[in-house]
Structures are given as C-alpha cells and as structure tokens.
Image: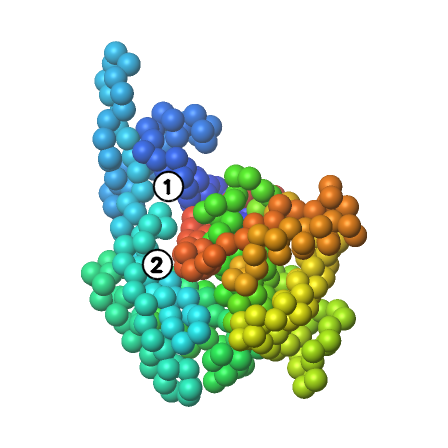
Amino acid sequence: MKNIVGKPQTIKKVNEDLIKNIIKNEGPITKPEISSITELSLATVNKIVEQLALKNEVKVSGLSESTGGRRAQLFEINANLEHIIALYYYRNCCIGVVANLLGEIIYQEEFNIRMDTYENVNQDTFFVIDTLIKKEKGNNIRAIGIGVPGVVKKGVVKNIPTIKSWEGINLENLIKSKYNTKVFIENDTNITTIGIYQKQYKDKYKNMALMYLEDGIGSGIVINGELYLGSTNFAGELSYLNIEFGKYNSNNLNLEDYIMSLRKRYLESKDNKFKKEILSIISNFIRTLVCVLNPQAMIIQCSILTKSDMEFIEKDVSNNVGEENFPKLIKVDSLREGSINGVISMCLKETDYQYSLSNKKGGY
C-alpha cells in the first residue's frame, strides 16, 4: 500500500480508494452502510459514490430490502471495466486466462510454448498475450501477470532451467515495452502458494508453507497471511539446503537433480529403496521448515506419496520436533488452479486502490 502525506489535497484520493475497496469487498452495499463502515459522513460518501458511478467504476446492482421507508440503492464494483491477463508456465505449456476485477476467470486456454530459443519463446508468449487481448473484447487491460519457474527479482529472471534463454532477462521490461501496461512477474511456486492460500486456507491459517516435488522442487511461504519472499526473493529455494543426501548419487548430482533422478528410478523400477530416500529428504525439508517457520499447515504436491508415506513423514518429523509443533500435513493432487489464481491475485493486489495516510513526510 502506498503511503502519502496527509495534506488536504490527498484526503479525497484516500477516501475514494477506501470507498472503492469497501464496495469491491463488501458489495452490493448501500451508501449508509459504507458510511457506517468507513466512519465518513454520509454526505462525503454520497459525493464520492456518485463520482465513481459517473466514471463507470461502480454501478447500481439493485435496491435494499424495504424497512418501511424508501429503499436504498445497492452499489457494486464494475468488475468488467478492466481485465487482468494472467500467464502461468509449466513444462512446455502456458495456461493463459482473462479475469475481471473480482478475480473471476472470463476465458482460459492452454498453449504450447517452444522453449528452445529466445526468439521462439518470446514469439509464442506474445501470441498468447495477443490471443487473450482479443478475447478481452476491447475493455482496458489493467495488468499482465506471469508466473515463471525461476527466481525473480525486480522483473529479472534467474535460475530458470526450463526456459534457459530467459536467464538474466528483465522479463517485466520486455513485456511492458510491447504492451504498455503494468506487468508483474513472480516465481511459480510462490504464486501458487498465495493462490491456494487465498482460495482455500486464508480463513483457517495465518502461517502456511507449500512444497512441490514433481518435475522440480520448490516451496512457498505464507507468514501472517502474506507471501514471504525474503530480502532477495530467495526464500523457499529448498534445492540449496545443505542436507545429507547421496546414497544413490554416483553421478554427483545436485540436490534437485538427485531427487528427480530418484523419482524417475522409482517410477521405472517400483523399488522402494528409492522412495525411502525421497521420504528421508522430504522429512529433512519439513523438519527445517518447522524449525525455522513453525507453520500451521504444510501443503505438499508429490504424486508418488501414498497415505502411508504421509503418515511415515509425520511420525519421523514429529519424533524430532514434537507432535505439538508438527503442522497439518495436506497432500494435493494438482496445483494448476491455485497457480493461475495466484497470478490473478498478484495483479489485483498490486494494482488495487492503494493509498493511505502517513504521519511522516514521504511515508514509510
């Protein structure tokens, strides 16, 4: 949220953003209800709501129930005034969606992406965005959001083995220069974590972690209801942990490649010795996260894990950290819905009505 000095000329903008957020989150809602929630005078609310209606940012959706007098108008946000375009990359594909200002998906399509060269991946990415813009049918694009399988800092993508030509590229600037709109880029696991949290778990937990072990490994962290990235967006990079491994690592693979090798060998041979090694590594991951973060819940996607495997992990870790400190362990079969919801949530949060008052010049 942007902080601005509380000078008289800024008060109107603060109140306007406050009212828009109330209408978006609580609508359909009447002007007296807005006045009660915000503690602004009814006259101020009346004026601002009418101005928002003239700009088509809010609209009348009906009338309140009768209480004996004149029925009050109900207002809601004009969800289709602008749209969000969201892209999420996985394997050789990209999920592309158009969503409205309430985060509701209007259109969704899956596209094949050529990731072999810089020119091809860019061309296919632009094709996806252009296709979605056409589906958006002429309304304004508020923002474009992209979830990528790499570390992202200030729009620059690093450690992205599946799209090697984007290594070190400022993807935010690349997309922004072509489409002249706000662009937000984030790591795929982080964005998936916040997407799942917002849709399914925000009313249950304040602190949560997600772990992904399929065609790569990674984790995302939620602390006090907010995605935690760390000072350099490196939080959750499990593959860099210095844990003991290598029982079947004759090729001196790094941790991520070693886990992927174990997974492949287990799927091909069904030899439980490879799965036991994976379970040992997962236990070490969770043990580390519990000791450092102490989350209330841990979401895991790892298709080879069975119910008995989950029970083994819980017992193994609990023996070290104590049952009272062990998080709720939740296995999910797919993260795709959470992934795209996370990209949409990121765009909406970063572009929402964001002004507040500060008691310091320049804000915080």
Which is nearer the eye, 179 or 242? 242
- Residue 70, placed above or below residue 254: above
Name the residue carrying label 2: 84
Q: Residues within 10 Å of mark 2 (few under 14, many from 20)?
A: many
Please, what secondary structure does the residue beneath circle 1 have?
helix
Which is nearer the eye, 181 or 126? 126
Q: In this view, does 125 lie to the left or right of 215?
A: left
- Residue 65, placed above or below residue 129: above
Horizontal and vertical percent position of residue 184: 45, 65
Q: Which residue is drawn at 45% across and 58% down?
A: 334
Horizontal and vertical percent position of residue 15: 43, 39
Q: Residues within 10 Å of mark 1 (few under 14, many from 20)?
A: some
Which three-letter amino acid code belongs to the residue tagged 2? Ile
The numbered mark, 2 or 1, whose residue comes first in the sequence reads 1
Image label count: 2
Horizontal and vertical percent position of residue 121: 39, 81
- Residue 262, placed above or below residue 135: below
Horizontal and vertical percent position of residue 176: 39, 72
Name the residue carrying label 1: 24
Q: Which residue is drawn at 24% across and 61% down?
A: 136
Q: Which residue is drawn at 33% across and 50% down?
A: 104
Residue 237 falls in which quadrant of the image? bottom right
Q: Please say whether residue 178 is visible from this viewpoint.
A: no
Dots 2, 1 in contact, CB < 8 A = no
Q: Farthest left residue? A: 137
CA gap between label 2 and label 1 equals 16 Å
Which is nearer the eye, 3 or 121? 121
- Specify the label residue 259 is tagged with: none
Q: Please say whether residue 251 is visible from this viewpoint.
A: yes
